Amino acid sequence: MVLGVGVASLGARPLEEIRLQLKWRHQFQFAGYYAAIEQGYYRDAGLEVTLREAVAGEEPAEYVLAGHAEFGVAASDLVLLHDQGHPVVVLAPILQHSPLILIAKAGVGVSSIHDLAGKKIMLEPHAEELLAYLEFENITRDEFEVVPHVFSPSPLLNDEVAAMSAYVTDELYLLRETGGEFLTFTPRSTGIDFYGDSLFTTRDQVAKFPDRVARFRDASLRGWAYALANPEDMVELIYERYSQRHSREHLRYEAEKFRQLMLPDVVDIGYQSPGRWRHIAETYHRMGMVSADYALEGFLYEEIVAGPDMRKLYTVLGGAGGIIAVMVLVIVLLVRMTRRIKEQADSLRKALNEVGELRGIIPICAGCKKIKDDKGYWEQVETYLEAHTAAEFTHGLCGDCISELYPGIPSRKKSDLPPPTP
């Protein structure tokens, strides 16, 4: 079933036609897009949006990648498509937590997740997070039988399978309406926390029509804000205009569960974290479904439109600058230290050179006290020392020589000094 809205008023710019591929049939799961149409958010953004329900045997993501729709709704398995080289871009995760769970009947041999080993489990396509959950609980793929999903709870009610995959927002309501008791098992209990429904497009759309993509995303998120704030109005709109497949009570139940999974009071609608996507990719990698060198480049809309993360760049540059500054300081200190060491070495070398000739035995005359140089000539002591050291001399007379040479001039001899005080 295809529904659309948006007629350009007379003289106004024609609305751009956009197609949104849903991942399932009309129900509260897509209330935000119904609200964006009904409240005129798409029209205000210059868009005429056509909604297309999922068709049996057709993959919604592949329909978008083939160019039949500009936008689509898919689950966290978009990571697998991105790793395979498909140009998918996540615009906004609508559900912060995946609604996918396992349901088993109580009292028929299943009381815990481990009791599913050796039994039949009815699984829908793209239920990899449930397979990861079972593996985390040490229930390997060869320990249970997978039965294709018929999108009806009948096989579980008729004991044809021990458990079935389901949306906590949908099938659980139908099962509880039967009056039976059921057990639910969620991957989140083991830390496997995937995003749920996510709005996505292609890199080609982002590159060629960036303004249109931004307008569509903003209008869609406005629609979801309205839907959560006015759930009763949305229940009536869906029931009267889109589908009566679900009762009003069923739609109300779905609306409440969606609010719990979207967490609008905790985070902005459509918020996505690269860390969460890496966690999802790592879970797929443990299952051998994603390459070890998987990277998010080109996958998240915010990072594409924002370009390189300059904060990271500035942090790296700042860190590099700090390291360079420290290195420069160390080099300056080393240069100064080297210079100082060189100066000390030169001084020491000079001193050694100055006293080098005075080492060893120096011949000195016992009578006149002249010194014999290395050429065999006798020199006065002061002449010898001036030639071999940096010392200079000034001449005077000691007391003994004054007494001897000039007996009439009083002099002070060492012998005239008083004895030292003990």
Image (cartoon, rainbow, N blue to C red):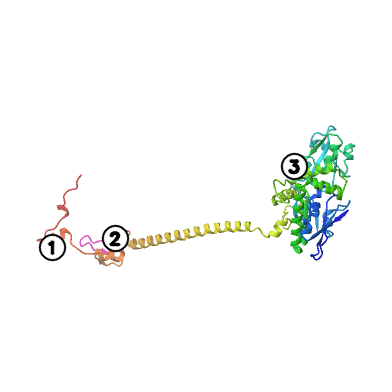
- Total numbered badges shown on the rendered structure: 3
Q: Earlier in the sequence, mark 2 or mark 3?
A: 3
Comparing 328 with 70, the one in front is 70
Amino acid type for the residue under numbered disc 1: Leu
Q: Is residue 162 above or below residue 75?
A: above
Return the residue at label 1: 405
Start and end of the magenta stretch? 360-372
Residue 122 lies in what quarter of the image?
top right
Image coords of residue 260 (percent x, y) = 75, 43
Q: Between disc 2 and disc 1, whose residue precedes?
A: 2
Residue at mark 3: 188
> Residue 45 vs residue 354: left or right?
right
Asked whether residue 42 is in view, the answer is: yes
The answer to whether residue 202 shows anywhere in this view is: no
Label 1, residues with CA under 10 Å away: few <14, some 14-19, many ≥20: few
Which secondary structure lies at badge 3?
helix
- The structure residue drawn at horizontal position 87% and vertical position 40%, both measured from the top left corner, is 153
* Secondary structure under the numbered disc 2 in the rendered image: loop
Q: Label 1's element?
A: helix
Residue 213 lies in quadrant: bottom right
Task: Name the side, left or right, on which 316 lies relative to 231.
Answer: left
